[in-house]
């Protein structure tokens, strides 16, 4: 995500800003891009971290570094934040997953070197819910239990011979899946239970509906939810694509913050907007911005974070971290 066209604009430097203008926010002295006016109205909730830097300038490596705090390597896979939380704090709701990843991200670090039971539940489309959890009418409970028992009998000798964590995790996966299928808490994944007006406010796109699903999951005790939002690689037509992407970001994130606050959940829920690096102050020949790990912005809100503050800074061009 371009920090200059969102949370770290440089209104006094037209050369780096291109077509992007700025707006005042609810907090005196903090200006944001005109691309995110709804978020600007909630600046009193935000801690804007403008002093971010990374040593990784490629997407996969930068993404992995931000998720795990380790550089990507071929010899080991490190856990992401949701796996760490579940490992040391267990699940918030025993019949729902410990963490959920909403979006299409096949390269997500997942549980890393932890057991597979600490992996997030992956949901591609937030409006589709969880597939294959409803049993067909002809497939009775007795048939279901019978087949599970047959599977356990076939697996028993192998499991006894190889009493290892990855083998145990395979059995645990079945137990967790069955528990979730039978749980009343599955209603957390049903976005149709929400008023149409609220769903419209979040935005009828995957990011907006993903934010809404995240709020529902947090309400039901899921400790960690991640909503991915790609397509920010604006090497071309930055000043056309970024406003389009910001429309989705602005609606989804601003509504999420207001919704959490109205339900008394914001103080206990940390919302983090993170990106693997920023984009260059220099505008290239294709009216785009290239990869830029030397200085960029992330944002935090809720969870005890003091809002209405900017932490750190980049220089007058948005090029390198100056504070």
Image: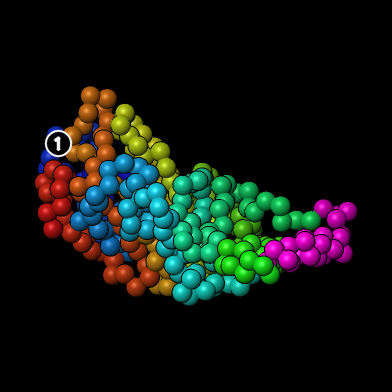
Kindly state the secondary structure of the residue where label 1 is placed: helix
**Figure check: 146 above or below 4:** below
Picture residue at 49% right of the left edge, 64% below the top: 114
Name the dominant secondary structure of the magenta segment. helix
Picture residue at 35% right of the left edge, 64% below the top: 301
Q: Along the line of sight, which residue is nearer the eye, 292 or 20?
A: 292
- As for residue 153 lying within the magenta part, the answer is yes
Q: Along the horizontal axis of the image, is 47 left or right of 247? A: left
How are the residues colored?
rainbow
**Figure check: 210 above or below 4:** below
Name, please, the residue furthest toward the top: 285
Q: Give the range drawn in magenta.
A: 136-159
Picture residue at 61% right of the left edge, 73% below the top: 94
Name, please, the residue furthest toward the bottom: 89
Report which quarter residue 323 is drawn in: bottom left
Residue 55 rendering spot, x and y as whole percentages: 24, 49
User: Which residue in the protein does label 1 denote?
Assistant: 14
- As for residue 57 lying within the magenta part, the answer is no
Residue 204 can be seen, yes or no = yes
Residue 173 can be seen, yes or no = no
Residue 140 rendering spot, x and y as whole percentages: 87, 60
Residue 319 rendering spot, x and y as whole percentages: 16, 44
Report which quarter residue 12 is drawn in: top left
Residue 61 rendering spot, x and y as whole percentages: 34, 46
Q: Quadrant of the N terminus?
A: top left
């Amino acid at each position: 995500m371009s920090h200059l066209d969102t949370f770290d604009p440089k209104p006094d430097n037209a050369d780096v800003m291109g077509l992007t203008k700025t707006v005042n926010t609810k907090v005196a002295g903090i200006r944001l891009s005109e691309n995110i006016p709804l978020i600007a109205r909630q600046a009193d909730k935000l801690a804007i971290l403008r002093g971010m830097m990374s040593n990784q300038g490629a997407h996969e490596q930068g993404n992995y570094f931000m998720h795990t705090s380790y550089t990507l390597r071929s010899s080991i896979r490190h856990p992401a934040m949701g796996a760490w939380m579940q490992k040391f704090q267990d699940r918030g709701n025993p019949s729902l997953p410990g963490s959920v990843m909403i979006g299409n991200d096949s390269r997500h670090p997942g549980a890393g070197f932890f057991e597979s039971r600490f992996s997030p539940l992956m949901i591609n489309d937030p409006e589709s819910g969880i597939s294959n959890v409803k049993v067909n009418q002809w497939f009775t409970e007795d048939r279901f239990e019978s087949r599970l028992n047959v599977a356990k009998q076939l697996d028993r000798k192998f499991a006894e011979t190889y009493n290892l964590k990855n083998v145990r995790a395979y059995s645990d996966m079945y137990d967790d899946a069955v528990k979730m299928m039978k749980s009343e808490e599955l209603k957390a994944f049903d976005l149709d239970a929400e008023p149409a007006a609220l769903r419209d406010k979040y935005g009828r796109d995957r990011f907006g509906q993903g934010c809404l699903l995240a709020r529902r999951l947090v309400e039901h005790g899921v400790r960690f939810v991640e909503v991915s939002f790609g397509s920010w690689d604006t090497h071309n037509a930055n000043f056309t694509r970024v406003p389009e992407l910001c429309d989705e970001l602005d609606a989804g994130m601003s509504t999420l913050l207001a919704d959490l606050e109205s339900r008394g959940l914001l103080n206990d829920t940390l919302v983090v907007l993170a990106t693997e690096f920023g984009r260059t102050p220099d505008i290239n020949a294709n009216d785009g911005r290239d990869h830029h790990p030397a200085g960029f912005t992330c944002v935090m809100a809720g969870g005890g974070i003091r809002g209405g503050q900017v932490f750190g800074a980049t220089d007058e061009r948005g090029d390198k971290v100056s504070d």
